[in-house]
Structure formats: structure tokens, C-alpha cells
Image: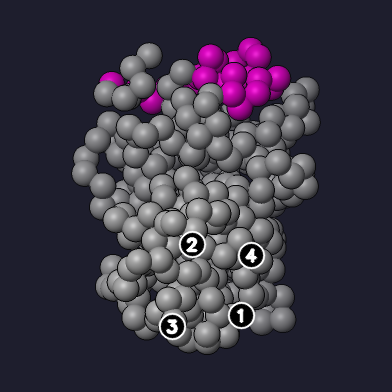
Amino acid sequence: MDNKLNSLNLQQLDYIPEGLLDASPESLHKLLSEPTLIHLSGKHKEPLFVSILLHGNEPTGFLAIQLLLKKYQNRSLPRSLSIFFGNTLAASKGLRRLDDQPDFNRIWPGTPFPTSPETEMATTIVEIMQNKNLFASIDIHNNTGLNPHYGCINKLEPQFLQLATLFARFVIYFNNPKGVQSAAFAEICPAITLECGRPDQQFGVVHALEFVDSCLNLTELPNHPVHQQDIDLFHTVAQVCIKDEIDFSFHDENTALLLSEDIEQLNFTEIATGTMLGQLNNTKQLPVVAKDEDGNDVSEQFFVIDHDNLTIKRPTMPSMLTLDEKVIRQDCLCYLMERIHL
């Protein structure tokens, strides 16, 4: 198969391929060599949509779906289920994406990416599912830093909030980055992204399994407001990236930015003005760029250089901070959040 995916085909099946329930994330590509959409019928006809492996190094969703399908192997699903198996090629190598691939969670309708086989595939999936009277959409992810389990939504409507609190009391409302799966599906049904902690934690698999199973067994999503005491709701106000021209490290003191090795301890912690994130070496420019939901540069609202230290300028709460340098470069350093009161 051409690794560049120049001729990307979406495979659709109405059965579980032999060997899928026992495959590893690394071997799945041998069974599903292209992105694949599997439709399985259940008692309630309005399907639940689940996307997994949009990032190849985030296997929790796949492992949870395997357990779910094994559970219902000899009995009817309580609700029809459509499963999208995303970047199986990257999964075969344990990578978020291959260097010549776009991010499979940035290719959905609304993406700023140029038209490509991947964006056309994502649009096709949305069009297919739009005609099926969807019950809800779940996109399952892992992250590499120290984060609690939380749900991410793109609308603050009651059914979105009810879906999110069914998974965790930590809920993040966001509208940036663009082109994510949950935002595209939020236009047609209640949609959520699950963040299930590190990929090597079995608790994440069990939590995702229980959530998907619960959704399959729901007859409807409540449409009444969530009580304030049942939710910790945050709004993403900025995405923070390290500038392309800045080299950084957690260990090499000769790099332009030496990040603190304790940085991921700050996730979901309300941090004070003056908190240091790293030290600068032979550079006076701000090494990061923070952009708000509209793409405006808000770096100077949140960061300042103080005695060659990169420090926080105002109280905020970060998420997704990680020690994985490749993930930081491919995605971002972190997101900054503020609490919302319903």
C-alpha cells in the first residue's frame, strides 16, 4: 500500500472481519488496510457512532471496542453501532500519524487543511452518517501527559452536557482547533471526545467500554440542564504551540527553551501568575505562540519572559502538557482553560 495514501479508499462493512476481535493495534492494518466504517444493526435503529484510532498511538478506543464486540458476540446489540477505524497505518507503527499524513483529527468538515484524499474521506463519512438519524457520536482518545479522564464538547446544549457528565465530571468546551471529528458531528447529533488518560492504562479501556456500553443501552439522552454541582466545566481559551524555529528539550541545556521536567504536574491545576514553565537560552523572543478560538495571537496576554524564564502572566488552567517532545511538535504544548459557571 502507498504510505502517502494518494488513493485513499473508505471501506464499508456490515460485519466484523475474522480476526478483528483478537488483533493488536499494530496488526490491525493487516485486516483493515484502509480506513474502515463498520455498520452493525441493533434493537434501536438510530445508531451510535464511535470513532477510534484517529491517532495511531492512542489504542484505548480500539481495545474498548474489541471488548464491547466480544460481549455482544452471541447476542443482539441494544442499539445499532457504526464504528470508524481511522489511521490503522499509523497504528501499525505506534505513531500519532506518519510524517507525510495529515492529522486524522483535523481533517473533518470545517478544517483549515487544503482538500486532500483524507478530508474528502472525512466529508464522505459525515454525509453517510447524516442520513442515519444518529443517536450520538463518541470519539475516543488518549493523551500522553498526566491528565484526569474528561470529555470534550463543542456545544453547551443540555444533551451534550448530559452525554459528557455520563463519562466524567471534568468537561471541556472548545471550538479550536478546527476540523475535529466531534465538531463536525456536533452539527448532526450530540457529540463528545473522550480523553481516557495514558494509552498504557487498563482503567482507560474499562472506562471507555463502560461509557460506550451505557450509551448503547440508553433509550434517550436527557434534555434537561445539568446541575452545577455535577460538573466541572471549562472553556478552552487558547492553544499554545512552541514556535517552529525554537528548539526545545526537557534535558538539553543548550536548546533555546529548556522546559521544566515537572510541567505535566500542572495539568488541570489552576496556576498562579509567575509560574515558570521553562528557561530560555540565547534568545530574547517569546518561544511560544498562543492563539484564541478565532486564531488571534494572544501570547502576550498569557506569557512573559522574566529573567530568562518563560512564565505565566495571569492565572489560568493548562491541560495536555506532556513530556513527549514529538507530540508537542506534532500537536501543541498545551491548552489554556478558564472555568465556566452554568
Q: How far apart are marks 3 and 1 (CA)?
A: 20 Å
Which region is colored magenta? 7-32
Q: Earlier in the sequence, mark 3 or mark 1?
A: 1
Q: Do the residues labelled 3 and 2 touch (CB within 8 Å)?
A: no
Q: Nearer the viewer, residue 269 or 149?
A: 269
Query: Residue type at mark 2?
Result: Leu
State the residue in front, 27 or 307: 307
Residue 262, numbered circle: 4
For label 1, the residue is 270
The 10 Å Cα crowd at callout 4, few under 14, some 14 to 19, many 20 or more, is: few
- Residue 342 drawn at (x, y percent): 57, 83
Lower sequence index among marks 2 and 1? 2
Residue 196, relative to residue 102: is it above or below?
below
Q: Measure the alpha-carbon separation of dots 3 and 2.
A: 14 Å
In the rendered image, residue 260 lying in the magenta stretch gets the answer no
Alpha carbon distance from label 4 to label 2: 12 Å
- Which of the pair 153/146 is nearer the observer? 146
Nearest-to-viewer mark from 4 and 1: 4
Callout 4: SS: loop
* Amino acid type at image mark 4: Asp
Q: Residues within 10 Å of mark 1 (few under 14, many from 20)?
A: some
> Does label 3 or label 2 sit earlier along the sequence?
2
Q: Residue beneath label 2, please?
A: 258
User: Which is in the foreground here, disc 3 or disc 1?
Assistant: 3
- Report the coloring of the rendering: one colour
Q: Write down the residue under mark 3.
A: 306
Helix, strand or loop status at disc 1: loop
Q: Where is residue 116 in the image (x, y as percent from the top left)?
A: 24, 35
Secondary structure beneath label 2:
strand
Label 4–label 3 contact, CB within 8 A:
no
| Residue occupying image coordinates x 58% and y 40% | 58
Q: Residue 203, image x and y in percent?
A: 77, 47
